[in-house]
Amino acid sequence: MNFVSLALACGLLACSGAAGNTDRSAATQPSPGLGPNLPNAPAAAAEPVLAAAQPTAAAPEEAKAVGPAAAVSCTFSALERFEGRTVKWEGECPGGKADGKGVLRAYPKAGSADKVVLIFFGTLERGDAKIGVIETPDGFMAGEFKQGKLQDSEDPNVTIRAFKVATEAATLVSERLKAAGNAASSAFYAKKAQTLQQQMD
Amino acid sequence: MPDINASVGKDAVNKSDDVFIVQRLLNERGFRCGTPDGVCGSRTRDAIVAFQRGFMHKPDGRVDPGGSSMKRLNQPGKPVTTEGGSLTRLVPKPERSTINSGLVAVNNTLMTQIFGKPREDYSEECQPVTNAVLKRNMTSASVGPFKVTGMTQAVRSLGEIMPEIQRLQPDVYAALGTAGMLCCRWVRGSTTSISNHSWGTAIDLKLNGVLDARGNNQVQYGLTLIAPIFNRFGWYWGAGFTTEDAMHFEAGRALVESWRPT
């Protein structure tokens, strides 16, 4: 299976490399870099970022490939806090749906003064987030997800498992980027893995 | 607007009338220092520091006549918890000397000596307590904003702390959640040290569903508002650990000693 790295506007309906000056072929290549907004993140190389076709609906919606035949189509459901943002998936995409351990990066809305990138580390199953951790500027939101929303749980094992899966996802992405020759991004995710691993006690 | 004639707090003049004014204003703003009595004790000094954390990178524990702390104490009608942004906004980790005053954290040796081992083997995940005596002393109950499972005495103590938080810091109370209390497992990365959660005397808190990041020497502002309340009930705040762990609160040594089985 191809390990793909695609940028989709969350809740949006276009998934192709054809928006503006994006490079369709680049949609199938490993992520060359990161967003510019995380502290100590390596300088981002150009990567396919798709413009939003229209505002997202209130309910989580599936991003779907439309328009000219895309080199790769990969869909996933919107995640809370990611609404209206351009979202990039680093992970497997079997049968056109984001699946397995990986990372979702949500970039700030175009023209927004908000420069914060949100990151989900965890597991998607056929496009739906199942368990993992969202990193925000103020800390971590961890646990199981249903229809894109974090489920409230007072069971400590849920939080522990979420951070374990998140650590594994960050490690997997780090290794993939290292294999692709992207040392800086690999180191970034390796550091994230370490932080996630040490969060609980 | 009331003002003081001389400084109040740490290394201050502390005239009785001035201390009384500051104590009253602190209480009105939710930074409880007890019944105003004109005496600047540790509780009053702690309350000044907790108040200053909302707007000072390095609280100095002192209120000067006409100074910024006095001006903020006199600002009417402005909820403290919304000053400068959300409850989860990050502020520098407080100096260790300004938190957990008079409290000592527990360790595995003490806990094992008092209560015994919770179980014989551990892993990275939470496993049940198998120590029969300890197991009988575990309770699940709502403490207000959430339900917990822990040592009965600790759960009861939380049941006293939460109403106090609700009374003094209602915004924080409304945002409170938990990542869990009882959890028998190794400390992360260790195969010799048991987590203090294993005895059900520690709890990890969330604000608006967000866990404070461990070890970055920054803490969520809302946690600084409730830490003094926990301290008053004998609970130690994990921001004072060598590796900052601000989401973590645990029964301190003296409190745990008071629960020693007879």
Image (cartoon, coloured by chain):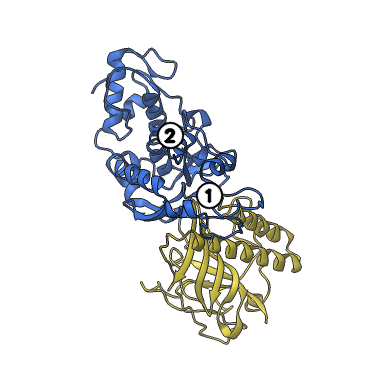
Chain colours: A yellow, B blue
How would you rate the neighbour count of disc 1 (Cα within 10 Å): few for under 14, some for 14-19, many for 20 or more? many
Depth order, front residue of A97/A19: A97
Q: CA distance from mark 1 to mark 2?
A: 18 Å
| Residue holding disc 1 | B213
Determine if residue B217 is in view: no
Label 2 chain ID: B
**Is A77 situated left or right of A71 in this image?**
left
Helix, strand or loop at disc 1? Answer: loop
Pinpoint residue A95: horizontal percent, then vertical percent: 58, 86
* Image quarter hosting the N terminus of chain A: bottom right
Left-right relation of B7 to A159: left
User: Is A97 in front, or is B21?
Assistant: B21
| Residue B45 vs residue B72, the one in the foreground | B45
Between tags 1 and 2, which lies in front? 1
- Note whether B13 is above or below B171 in the view shown: above
| Mark 2 lies on residue | B53
Q: Are marks 1 and 2 in contact (CB under 8 Å)?
A: no
Q: Is residue B16 left or right of residue A158?
A: left
What amino acid is found at the position of numbered circle 1 in the picture? Ala
What amino acid is labelled 2 in the image? Arg
Q: From this view, report whether residue B122 is shown above or below residue A27.
A: above
**Crowd around label 2: few <14 · some 14–19 · many ≥20 (10 Å):** many
Position in image of residue B21 (x %, y %): 27, 21
Write the residue at 35% across / 51% down.
B175
Work out whether B45 lies above or below B94. above
Residue A42 drawn at (x, y percent):
66, 55
Residue B3, picture quadrant: top left
Residue A37 image position (x, y, % from top left): 56, 55
